[in-house]
Image (cartoon, rainbow, N blue to C red):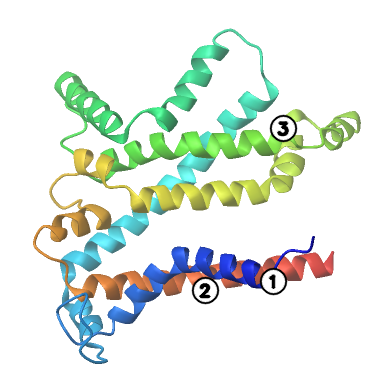
Amino acid sequence: MKPNPWLRLLSFALGFGFLYLPLFTLVVFSFNASEMVTKWSGFSLRWYRELLNDEVLLSAAWLSLRVAAMTATMAVVIGTWAGYVLARMRRFPGISLFVAMISAPLVIPEVILGISLLLMFVELHNLTGWPEGQGVFTIWVGHVVLATAYVAVIIQSRLREFDRSLEEAALDLGATPLTVFFRITLPLIAPALAAGWLLAFTLSLDDVVIASFLSGPGSTLLSPEIFARVRLGLKPEVNALATIFIVAVGICVLVAYRLQKRKEVSS
């Protein structure tokens, strides 16, 4: 029995509509002249001009991007090491504790994780005088703890499917294990590293709970700032900022796709 093409088209439309219709609506209403985010009253660039004058929102967005980039980079470094250990060194003393520590952020509610980190920093400050209050550093540490677990899972999965004969051949030819890791293993798992970096970047940019516990004066990120404004009623300038993010992400995805296709054709 052949599948009904109309049913396939309907399923396709419903699926993509469910995913992207809210984003499309957000983009459209970012050009709305009215202050009402749900009532269209005409095309206008007013809220993009308002966004340029909103220093608090722009500062929060820029800080969020910096923290997310730093978080993603450190999470990839630590997560790659952790994933490599989980995939290659499956039996050593303390393996159960190591797996539990890596996996804990995946199952612990972010509220519990945020409170735990806050208490840790408070006690550390009481004992050593450092860090002096909550700020960018404490948020960064919290986001790294959260994102590293996800990166480790991605790297572990990729390494378990990895053809180890390439590494063994390099070792037989005289390469050191460290050389094999940096010259053979890392280049071959580069797509997994990129996926882990992007996931960690997104987790940091999207986080509200941990950032709310660990932020301090002058270190408010974009997500907590938007969440705080919801109580007073959002203005379409938030839609304008979100539209800029969507366009930037879309351009990055298209560029990455083109580069990947060019690489496949050349190979």
Q: Is residue 203 above or below residue 114?
A: below
In the drawing, does residue 242 fall left or right of residue 81?
left
Q: CA distance from mark 1 to mark 3?
A: 39 Å
Q: CA distance from mark 2 to mark 3?
A: 32 Å
Element marked by disc 2: helix
Tag 1 residue: 5
How crowded pointer 3 is (Cα within 10 Å; few <14, some 14-19, many 20+) is rated as some
Q: Which one is in front in this view, the residue at disc 2 or the one at disc 1?
A: 1
Residues at marks 2 and 1 touching, judged by CB atoms closer than 8 Å: no
- Corner quadrant of residue 242: bottom left
Residues at marks 2 and 3 touching, judged by CB atoms closer than 8 Å: no
Tag 2 residue: 251
Tag 3 residue: 160
Residue depicted at x 36% and y 53%: 205
Label disc, if present, on residue 111 of the rendered structure: none
Q: Position of residue 84 (x, y in %)?
A: 64, 30
